[in-house]
Image (cartoon, grey):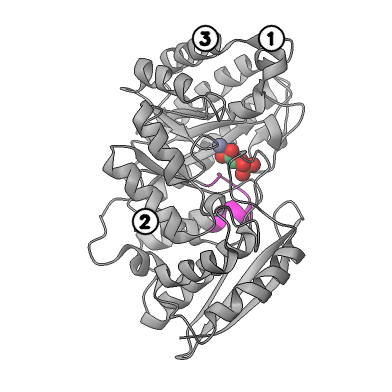
């Protein structure tokens, strides 16, 4: 039984305050988790309140429904109590940041009571044996780094790596190789919010730099490393401008679809996230028709980890994979429901960090528990390596 829930403001990786939750149980169980925070947030995400407001509201409404009422190990009951305390469909009353921190902390407390690692508690005895492939952000711009590329993320995808550990180190090697190439080209770069290089170069140049880095490291390590993108196209789309804005170049929806299909062909892209605006199910469906056989077309801002939006996408044939960010929807139960609906309909799940992160490692456990195809959690920097190193420990069964 939950005996106490403590909430506090802690720092995230951008230096902004975020919500951290501690959950304590009668039998001595303890769990701690913190909410991440986006910069290129989707319009349809659950609501993140200023942390002090979210904490005050959760203390008033949610904690009384949890303490001495609910078992930490019963995730559906914990998350049901959070939903009931909030009373809205987007957590605008207690904040998705308070909700997700409590939801994840309760899961950890539940695992602690059982003496099981979190991935085992969440995934259960019939969990699959696969490990997720880490997508490593190596060059980026958009909302994560001004004056860099228009496309938000250029990702390494070590699909041929024989182990999680080798995949994680492959991404770090691509990140390092990108830096060398940028130096050789006379365009040394600072880093964006997620630790990716943020060079002042065009998207076209970035494609070539990442393509070269990926193929150099792939040759050196002797296994296949794919190339992917998060275009975060909702941030590029401007209705008044009539399309997707790349500096002076504006692409219509049809041109955007052609552009992405051309890049898929030219660079053999294995993964493209948010290639179109967050309202454009039709454009997603058209692109999926054209390249979905060879490439994962993933909805992040399109689906926002929401089963209703995902169902709409399934019905329309929009995309073939979904990004899962627990804080987009506010609870682990909702995130699990989204994964389940996705998998039942042949969509791959990609478990993801946010651009604003903490040392919290829940998503590494979530990716293993759900048998997710990929995990997107950066490449370097402490708040990213926290998850990657946890993944290595899980694979080593040393958690
Ligand atoms: P965000 O970006 O966390 O800033 O929303 C990550 C993403 O778009 O995948
Ligand atoms: Zn995204």
Q: Position of residue 8 (x, y in %)?
A: 70, 72
Left or right of residue 72: residue 378: right
Q: Residues within 10 Å of mark 1 (few under 14, many from 20)?
A: few
Q: Circle 3 — which element?
A: helix
Residue 137 location, x and y as percent?
A: 56, 37
Whole-percent x, y for residue 258 in the image: 49, 10
Instruction: Residue at 63% x, 59% y: name it.
Output: 97
As drawn, 78 above or below 44: below
Report how many numbered discs are placed on residues in the image: 3
- What is the C-alpha distance between the residues marked 1 and 3? 14 Å
Quadrant location of the N terminus in the rendered image: bottom left
Nearer mark to the viewer, of 1 and 3: 3
Of the two numbered discs 1 and 2 on the same chain, state the one appearing first in sequence.
1
Q: Which residues are magenta?
A: 377-386
Q: Which mark is residue 368?
A: 2
Instruction: First in sequence, mark 1 or 3: give its number.
Output: 1
Q: Label 1: which residue?
A: 249
**In the rendered image, the vertical position of residue 223 relative to residue 244, given as above or below:** below
Q: Which mark is residue 254?
A: 3
From this view, report whether residue 139 is shown above or below residue 128. above
Horizontal side, residue 262 vs residue 34: left or right = left
Q: Is mark 2 within 8 Å of ligand 1?
A: no
């Amino acid at each position: 039984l939950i005996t106490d829930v403590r909430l506090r403001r802690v720092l995230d990786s951008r230096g902004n305050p975020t919500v951290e939750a501690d959950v304590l149980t009668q039998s001595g169980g303890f769990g701690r988790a913190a909410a991440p925070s986006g910069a290129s947030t989707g319009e349809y995400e659950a609501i993140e309140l200023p942390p002090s407001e979210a904490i005050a509201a959760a203390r008033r409404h949610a904690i009384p429904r949890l303490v001495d009422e609910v078992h930490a190990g019963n995730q559906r009951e914990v998350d049901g109590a959070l939903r009931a305390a909030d009373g809205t469909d987007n957590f605008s009353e207690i904040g998705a940041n308070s909700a997700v921190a409590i939801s994840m902390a309760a899961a950890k407390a539940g695992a602690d009571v059982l003496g099981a690692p979190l991935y085992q508690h969440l995934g259960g005895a019939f969990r699959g044996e696969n490990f997720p492939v880490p997508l490593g952000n190596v060059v980026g711009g958009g909302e994560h780094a001004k004056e860099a590329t228009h496309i938000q993320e250029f990702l390494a995808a070590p699909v041929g790596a024989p182990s999680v550990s080798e995949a994680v180190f492959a991404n770090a090697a691509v990140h390092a190789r990108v830096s060398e190439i940028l130096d050789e080209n006379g365009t040394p770069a600072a880093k964006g919010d997620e630790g990716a290089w943020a060079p002042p170069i065009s998207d076209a140049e970035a494609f070539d730099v990442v393509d070269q880095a990926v193929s150099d490291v792939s040759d050196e390590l002797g296994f296949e490393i794919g190339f992917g993108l998060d275009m975060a196209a909702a941030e590029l789309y401007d209705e008044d401008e009539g399309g997707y804005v790349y500096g002076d170049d504006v692409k219509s929806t049809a041109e955007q679809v052609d552009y992405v299909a051309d890049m898929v062909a030219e660079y053999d892209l294995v993964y493209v996230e948010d290639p179109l605006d967050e309202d454009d199910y039709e454009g997603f469906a058209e692109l999926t028709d054209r390249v979905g056989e060879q490439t994962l077309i993933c909805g992040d801002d399109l689906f926002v980890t929401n089963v209703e939006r995902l169902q709409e996408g399934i019905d329309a044939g929009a995309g073939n994979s979904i990004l899962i960010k627990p804080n987009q929807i506010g609870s682990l139960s909702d995130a699990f429901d989204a994964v389940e609906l996705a998998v039942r309909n042949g969509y791959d799940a990609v478990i993801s960090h946010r651009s604003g992160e903490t040392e919290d490692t829940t998503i590494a456990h979530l990716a293993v528990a759900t048998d997710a195809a990929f995990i997107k959690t950066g490449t370097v920097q402490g708040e990213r390596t926290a998850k990657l190193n946890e993944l290595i420990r899980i694979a080593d069964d040393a958690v």
